[in-house]
Amino acid sequence: DGGITQSPKYLFRKEGQNVTLSCEQNLNHDAMYWYRQDPGQGLRLIYYSQIVNDFQKGDIAEGYSVSREKKESFPLTVTSAQKNPTAFYLCASAMAGGDRNTEAFFGQGTRLTVV
Amino acid sequence: AQSVSQHNHHVILSEAASLELGCNYSYGGTVNLFWYVQYPGQHLQLLLKYFSGDPLVKGIKGFEAEFIKSKFSFNLRKPSVQWSDTAEYFCAVNAAGYNKLIFGAGTRLAVHP
């Protein structure tokens, strides 16, 4: 099946530990995104990438890092510098066509709880 | 930088009532506009999108939205809601040249039978 796979669905970590969330897509999309979803705040953009080996900070990049070594993979690391890491994290991908992207397709998300 | 505002955070309606959810964006150039829906326990899915052409776009499940460029708005409408429309609705904008997709804070809709 074509789609976006995020793993794991639930993740628990101790405070002060780095943790990496996985996102894989087999849609051959150029663009990939990471969002954080908190109640009442919608989806806030953490990082996005338009092509392999390139990525840009979104609106809330502090305390996060990403890599884009392969077109199909865009892992997100939540570092110990992120002050409030407990949240629901969503990965998305989209075709990148010139100045415009097409609609984004979303994974099912990873709920991270830091204790 | 672009931003998206959704005016209503919570909306409660009875079945068969009409729905209009407001969405305004801030960006002076060419934009792509989207409405996404998140049903309880499910992942986000696209309701409808506007890229160019007819400013009145129709989506799935009887939803439609109208792009009014002069008002920087892209309001979502449905003439008669059903209990199954209970969900959270997100407006999103992708501005040409910025290459990033920005979402509003969402509107949580509850439809009572």
Image (spheres, coloured by chain):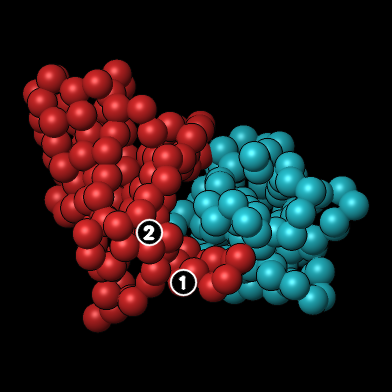
Chain colours: A red, B cyan
Q: Residues within 10 Å of mark 1 (few under 14, many from 20)?
A: some
Mark yes or no: residue B40 visible.
Answer: no
Q: Secondary structure at mark 2?
A: strand
Q: Residue at x 19, y 46 (%)?
A: A21
The dot on residue A32 is: 2
Pointer 1 chain: A
Q: Nearer the viewer, residue B34 or A18?
A: A18
Residue A95 — which label? Answer: 1
Residue A85, horizontal then vertical, whole percent: 27, 27
Assign a secondary structure to mark 1: loop
What residue do we see at 13% from left, 20% from top? A16
Is B96 located above or below residue B23 in the figure? below
In the image, taking residue A86 as reference, residue A57 lies left or right, namely right
Determine the CA span between mark 1 and mark 2: 9 Å
Residue B3, x across and y down, in percent: 65, 40
Identity, as a three-letter code, of the amino acid under mark 2: Met
Q: Are marks 1 and 2 on the same chain?
A: yes
For residue B105, which quarter of the picture? top right
Q: Is residue A11 left or right of residue A63?
A: left
The answer, for residue B69, to whether it is visible in the render is yes
Which is more N-terminal, label 2 or label 1? 2
Residue B35 vs residue B92, the one in the foreground: B92
Percent x, y of residue B97: 63, 56
- Between residues A23 and B7, which one lies in front from this camera angle? A23
